[in-house]
Image (tube, rainbow, N blue to C red):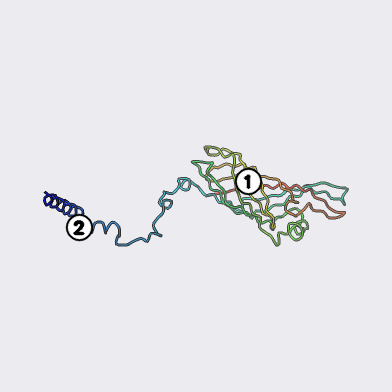
């Protein structure tokens, strides 16, 4: 009886070994699966993020570039001429040296965005070359710091849908750098798109003292207000 049991056990073990052993073909198939002809090191295998499709937001975006010659930035500041019986007037300076891009998502307007906007403030011109030169050399020092930069950080109030030719109002907040000082600023914007051209204006007020450039005072001659109105009128095309 013990011999029969022993023989039966040996037979079961042999049968199990034969069943589990892979054939040469199976070995080759496994090898091909694990080690392809052009192996990819584990560190170079694409990640799950890399394998995701491109966002529809990117494919639906139209880029509009601000046209410098057709756009302008204007400053307006009140000034009192102490040597002219305290005559009050508004100084206005204009430059058309502007660059920047608008990334408009016409299928989903709230997904739209802006690039950094740069303005060459050394090119500001008013009705007085004497004022312009004093601003470049003494107060704004735009001869040394010619570029003012606005870096958008948030856009609020964009519509859920877009209609050709209709004007929309919204707000753009960002960081404005003048000389070596950066401050948060919010622009009130109005814009419309018609015939593949984006037009509009963006307005804000800033304090010269926030940027260390004023208010401007020339003893016995001139005194300016601290508040400056800044307006960007833009034309942008694809």
Q: Nearer the viewer, residue 127 or 148?
A: 148
Give the structural element (helix, strand or loop) at label 2: helix
Coordinates of residue 28 in the picture (x, y in percent)? 23, 59
Front label number (2 vs 1):
2
Q: Is residue 33 left or right of residue 165?
A: left
Question: Which residue is under mark 2?
Answer: 25
Q: Residue at x 57, y 41 (%)?
A: 192
Residue shown at 68% from the left, 56% from the top: 121
Mark 1 lies on a secondary structure that is strand
Provide the residue designation for mark 1: 173
Question: Which of the two residues, 183 or 166, is positioned nearer the viewer here?
Answer: 183
Q: Are marks 2 and 1 in contact (CB under 8 Å)?
A: no
Q: CA distance from mark 2 to mark 1?
A: 67 Å
Q: How many marks?
A: 2
Crowding near pointer 2: few (<14 within 10 Å), some, many (20+)?
Answer: few
Q: Position of residue 92 (x, y in %)?
A: 73, 50
- Between residues 30 and 112, which one lies in front from this camera angle? 30
């Amino acid at each position: 009886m013990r011999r029969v049991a022993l023989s039966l056990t040996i037979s079961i073990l042999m049968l199990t070994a034969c069943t589990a052993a892979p054939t040469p073909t199976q070995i080759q198939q496994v090898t091909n699966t694990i080690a392809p002809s052009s192996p990819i090191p584990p560190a170079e295998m694409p990640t799950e993020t890399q394998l995701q499709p491109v966002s529809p937001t990117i494919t639906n975006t139209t880029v509009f570039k601000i046209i410098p010659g057709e756009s302008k930035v204007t400053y307006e500041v009140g000034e009192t001429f102490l040597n002219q019986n305290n005559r009050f007037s508004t100084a206005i300076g204009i430059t058309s040296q502007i660059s920047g891009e608008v990334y408009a998502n016409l299928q989903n307007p709230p997904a739209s965005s802006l690039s950094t906007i740069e303005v060459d403030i050394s090119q500001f011109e008013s009705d007085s070359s004497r004022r312009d030169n004093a601003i470049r050399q003494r107060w704004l020092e735009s001869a040394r710091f010619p570029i003012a930069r606005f870096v958008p950080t948030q856009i609020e109030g964009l519509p859920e849908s877009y209609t050709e030719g209709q004007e929309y109002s919204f707000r753009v907040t960002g960081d404005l750098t003048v000389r070596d000082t950066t401050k948060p600023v919010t622009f009130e914007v109005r814009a419309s798109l018609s015939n593949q051209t984006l037009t509009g204006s963006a307005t804000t007020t800033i304090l010269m003292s926030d940027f260390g450039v004023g208010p401007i005072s020339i003893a016995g001659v001139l005194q300016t207000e601290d508040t400056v109105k800044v307006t960007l009128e833009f034309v942008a095309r694809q």
